[in-house]
């Protein structure tokens, strides 16, 4: 039986081995939509990964990830742009719904967050014509403010949508509940994104109390404080009916067998999401 509307981000089950093994594990649980990471694709090779996807009729709700544009000098920024073009090529080869963009934080040694945000905008603007030509939408993922310095200096949906409006067609947002559930402007900004067709992906997990590690202590759906059903209603009311992509960075869940993790995800998706 296929589990409609559910996607698995491969960060959630990376303990399960190779790209092909992770695909097989998902298929065994009726999951036919995934979102892989670039190193996992590189491990098997892009051609083989694309073949596996095609042969098994797999959908990619996203490809992780592009971004990390800010750098201390022009050489670094050009290197980042070249790597992002390769990420676009990968997403296109696997027919991904979008390339997820974790845009990057402050360059090493910098205290200029305004300048970092400008580097992100400049990098996105330089990449966008290449992505448009390849048919790959760029999904900016705003990250929680505690990531502003090192991972993403765009931290709210409003910031990200303002950037999308300036950049134009071919851009949108990946809305991850972990990063934006707290935002007092959330409902307004989700509706705005929906009106403009800018919701490209929807990621789910849960926020544990207490959170012991902001990066690697995300919760399984239902174990934390996020109103996941309410969040889903909000996103769907805005017009997005794509997959709910489970992305759980968690040392505790990586210690469990993949089959157990996937069984739990399916059960929680059907009951609390």
Image: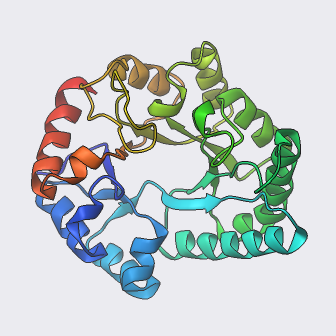
Vertical arrangement, residue 204 with respect to residue 115, above or below: above
Figure disc tally: 0
Tell me the residue at 55%/56% (across/down).
98
Vertical arrangement, residue 227 with respect to residue 23, above or below: above
Vertical arrangement, residue 201 with respect to residue 97, above or below: above
Relative horizontal placement of residue 259, taking residue 237 as reference (left or right): left
Farthest front residue?
109
Front-lying residue, 120 or 250 = 250
Tell me the residue at 36%/56% (across/down).
11
Tell me the residue at 51%/57% (across/down).
97
State the image coordinates of residue 167 (x, y, percent, origin top left): 82, 47
State the image coordinates of residue 81 (x, y, percent, origin top left): 76, 70
Q: Quadrant of residue 190?
A: top right
Farthest top residue?
184
State the image coordinates of residue 271 (x, y, percent, origin top left): 17, 26
Q: Quadrant of residue 257?
A: bottom left
Relative horizontal placement of residue 109, taking residue 270 as reference (left or right): right
Scheme of image coloration = rainbow
Q: If the image is split into quadrants, where does the C terminus sit?
A: top left
State the image coordinates of residue 130 (x, y, percent, origin top left): 75, 70
């Amino acid at each position: 039986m296929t589990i409609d509307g559910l996607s698995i981000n491969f960060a959630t089950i990376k303990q399960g081995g190779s790209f092909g093994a992770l695909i097989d594990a998902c298929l065994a649980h009726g999951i036919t939509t995934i979102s892989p990471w670039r190193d996992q694709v590189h491990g098997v090779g892009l051609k083989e990964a694309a073949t596996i996807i095609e042969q098994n009729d797999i959908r990619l709700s996203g490809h992780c990830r592009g971004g990390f544009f800010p750098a201390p000098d022009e050489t670094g920024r050009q290197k980042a742009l070249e790597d992002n073009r390769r990420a676009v090529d990968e997403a296109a080869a696997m027919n991904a719904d979008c390339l997820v963009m974790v845009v990057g934080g402050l360059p090493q040694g910098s205290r200029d967050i305004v300048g970092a945000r400008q580097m992100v905008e400049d990098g996105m603007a330089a990449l966008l014509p290449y992505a448009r030509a390849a048919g790959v939408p760029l999904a900016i993922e705003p990250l929680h403010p505690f990531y502003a310095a090192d991972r993403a200096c765009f931290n709210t949906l409003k910031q990200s949508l303002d950037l999308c409006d300036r950049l134009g067609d071919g851009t949108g947002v990946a809305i991850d509940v972990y990063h934006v559930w707290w935002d007092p402007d959330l409902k307004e900004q989700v509706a705005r994104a929906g009106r403009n067709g800018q919701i490209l992906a929807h990621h789910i997990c849960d926020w544990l109390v207490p959170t012991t590690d902001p990066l690697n202590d995300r919760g399984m759906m239902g174990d934390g404080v996020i109103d996941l059903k309410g969040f889903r209603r909000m996103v769907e009311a805005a017009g997005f009916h794509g997959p709910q992509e489970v992305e759980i960075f968690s040392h505790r869940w990586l210690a469990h067998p993949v089959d157990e993790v996937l069984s739990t995800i399916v059960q929680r998706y059907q009951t609390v999401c």
